[in-house]
């Protein structure tokens, strides 16, 4: 934005408007160039999503094949999550320093190298170390994909754009566990990681061709103190939460010590960031945007409900009903299908009516469809449960599309990278908290269960808590923005002459 009366400099090339057209944007249409950019990024992101969901069914199998305990092999997932959490806060600075295109291709390269190293691992410790390399690349990609697409969209059609962005999130739970079961049943476990290679190679090729060049204008200084406070703080909290399920509960020193240390580091970062303002690693002043603040809380709760329930569902079918990993994965497909089909509709209604009403309806639907699982028995019909899962998936798909999309309403282009980082961190911590709490509840509720019926009762208690997480989100959805309005004047000023920017 320039001072009043000053002449605006020539507009930079717009990747979503390659023809240079200055006519009014069609509010009901996503530009083909933006679709191409989104498709390019999704191809690479699928490697990350499939890797995470395939690993969810592979832990027990890896323990047997590597002659290691399940608690040791569990670090294959834990180390990956800690690497994700460590790198996410720095993505905004990395993008400003390297540029989005170069950072994306570099992150794909790191993830590819990590995947090849994992496939070459010779024992559990080496696999755990190589998963850290994967996690660094994956953490950058998870934040950067949303950032680049939202920056290119320039505030237009946020709901429809978010419906496109969440394609990997929807496809991962549908195909990942099934692919994992098939790979482990038919082939060598190393193909779990080699499966990522085509996505990384094709994704890097498309990125080199299709992503616009965005050389950084300036190279900001890294907030070293903020990095040393925030990244270890988030990692310590996630580690402490991950220990709850395999310990004696929150009183175990392996749980409360890292949790206390992590919270202390996060409080220290909060004080530091308030002093540094916009120069902090992550500007906490962005929470002045009510949309981002309320969305972050809701993303935390939805992450707890989504990831926590994804722990319970396959375990119910495996432990109570005697299904193997592949059968459990197949039974979960209806939820993924429901999530996939509801995204586009939710995005369209969000752009028309606002995030608030769509999120309220979607969360209420997800909550209602979780309640039947609180009454499961050892003989509940699988057909009924799969039908309920489809409805639950419809609610979750609508909720995630609108809640994640709402975070970007009102953000300036330069604020989007840090907004993406905040949203992803909230989702990761929420997912870890929900998984840890539900695992602890299930462990205690089924401690004395010696029959399938008693074990099913323990699962029912855990599902009541999962229902409560979802129910708590419904009133908070009322804090989200309502019917869309015109974008802020600074966005209007940033548009080329004659172009109307519409949300």
Image: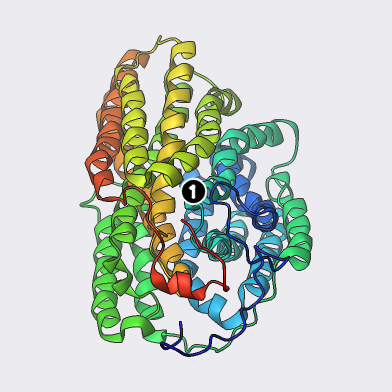
**In the rendered image of this protein, does residue 148 appear above or below residue 194?**
below
Identify the residue at image location x=71%, y=54%: 119
Q: Would residue 15 appear left or right of 170 to someone viewing this image? A: right
Q: Would residue 310 appear left or right of 117 to someone viewing this image? A: left
Identify the residue at image location x=63%, y=32%: 178
- Front residue of this view, candidates 263 and 337: 337
Identify the residue at image location x=27%, y=68%: 288
Residue 135, given in percent of the width and then of the height, sits at 56, 61
- Snapshot colouring: rainbow
Q: Secondary structure at mark 1?
A: loop
Q: Would residue 189 appear left or right of 405 to someone viewing this image? A: right
**In the rendered image of this protein, does residue 22 appear above or below residue 253?**
below
Residue 89, given in percent of the width and then of the height, sits at 44, 70
Residue 219, given in percent of the width and then of the height, sits at 54, 89
- Front residue of this view, candidates 324 and 227: 227
For disc 1, the neighbor class at 10 Å (few under 14, some 14 to 19, many from 20) is some
Q: Is residue 248 visible?
A: no
Residue 102, given in percent of the width and then of the height, sits at 67, 74
**In the rendered image of this protein, does residue 103 appear above or below residue 147?**
below
**In the rendered image of this protein, does residue 221 appear above or below residue 490?**
below
Would you name the residue on which mark 1 appears?
A: 74
Q: Is residue 403 visible?
A: yes
Identify the residue at image location x=33%, y=56%: 296
- Front residue of this view, candidates 137 and 493: 493
- Front residue of this view, candidates 472 and 139: 472
State the count of labels: 1
Name the image quarter holding residue 310. top left
């Amino acid at each position: 934005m320039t001072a009043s009366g000053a002449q605006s400099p020539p507009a930079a090339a717009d990747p979503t408007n390659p023809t240079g057209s200055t006519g009014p944007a069609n509010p009901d249409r996503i530009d083909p160039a933006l679709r191409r950019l989104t498709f390019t990024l999704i191809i690479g992101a699928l490697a990350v999503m499939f890797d995470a969901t395939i690993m969810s069914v592979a832990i027990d199998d890896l323990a047997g094949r590597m002659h290691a305990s399940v608690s040791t092999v569990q670090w294959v997932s834990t180390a990956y999550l800690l690497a994700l959490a460590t790198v996410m806060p720095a993505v905004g600075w990395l993008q400003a320093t390297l540029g989005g295109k170069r950072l994306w291709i570099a992150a794909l390269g790191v993830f590819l190298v990590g995947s090849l190293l994992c496939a070459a691992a010779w024992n559990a410790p080496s696999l755990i170390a190589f998963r850290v390399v994967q996690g660094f690349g994956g953490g950058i990609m998870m934040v950067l994909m949303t950032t680049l697409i939202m920056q290119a969209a320039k505030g237009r059609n946020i709901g429809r754009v978010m419906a496109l962005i969440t394609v990997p999130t929807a496809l991962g739970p549908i195909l990942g566990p099934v692919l994992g079961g098939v790979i482990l049943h038919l082939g060598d476990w190393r193909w779990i990681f080699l499966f990522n290679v085509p996505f990384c190679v094709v994704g890097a090729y498309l990125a080199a061709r299709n992503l616009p060049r965005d050389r950084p204008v300036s190279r900001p200084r890294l907030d070293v103190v903020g990095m040393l406070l925030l990244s270890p703080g988030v990692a310590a909290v996630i580690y402490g939460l991950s220990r709850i399920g395999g310990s004696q509960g929150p009183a175990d020193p392996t749980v409360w010590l890292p949790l206390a240390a992590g919270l202390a580091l996060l409080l220290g970062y909060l004080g530091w960031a308030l002093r540094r303002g916009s120069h902090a690693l992550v500007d906490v002043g962005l929470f002045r945007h009510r949309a981002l603040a309320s969305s972050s809380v809701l993303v935390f709760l939805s992450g707890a409900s989504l990831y926590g329930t994804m722990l319970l569902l396959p375990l119910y079918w495996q432990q109570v009903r005697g299904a193997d990993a592949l059968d459990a994965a197949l039974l979960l497909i209806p939820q993924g299908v429901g999530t996939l089909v509801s995204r586009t509709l939710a995005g369209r209604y969000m752009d028309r009516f606002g995030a608030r009403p769509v999120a309220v309806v979607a969360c209420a639907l997800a909550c209602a469809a979780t309640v039947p699982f609180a009454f499961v028995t050892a003989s509940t019909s699988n057909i009924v449960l799969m039908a309920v899962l489809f409805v639950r998936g419809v609610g979750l798909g609508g909720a995630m599309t609108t809640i994640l999309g709402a975070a970007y309403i009102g953000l300036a282009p330069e604020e989007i990278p840090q907004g993406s980082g905040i949203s992803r961190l909230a989702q990761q911590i929420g997912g870890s908290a929900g998984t840890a709490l539900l695992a602890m509840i299930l462990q205690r509720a089924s401690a004395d269960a010696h029959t399938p019926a008693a074990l099913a009762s323990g699962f029912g208690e855990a599902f009541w808590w999962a229902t409560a997480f979802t129910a708590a989100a419904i009133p908070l959805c009322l804090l989200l923005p309502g019917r869309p309005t015109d974008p802020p004047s600074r966005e209007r000023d940033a548009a080329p002459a004659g172009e109307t920017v519409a949300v």
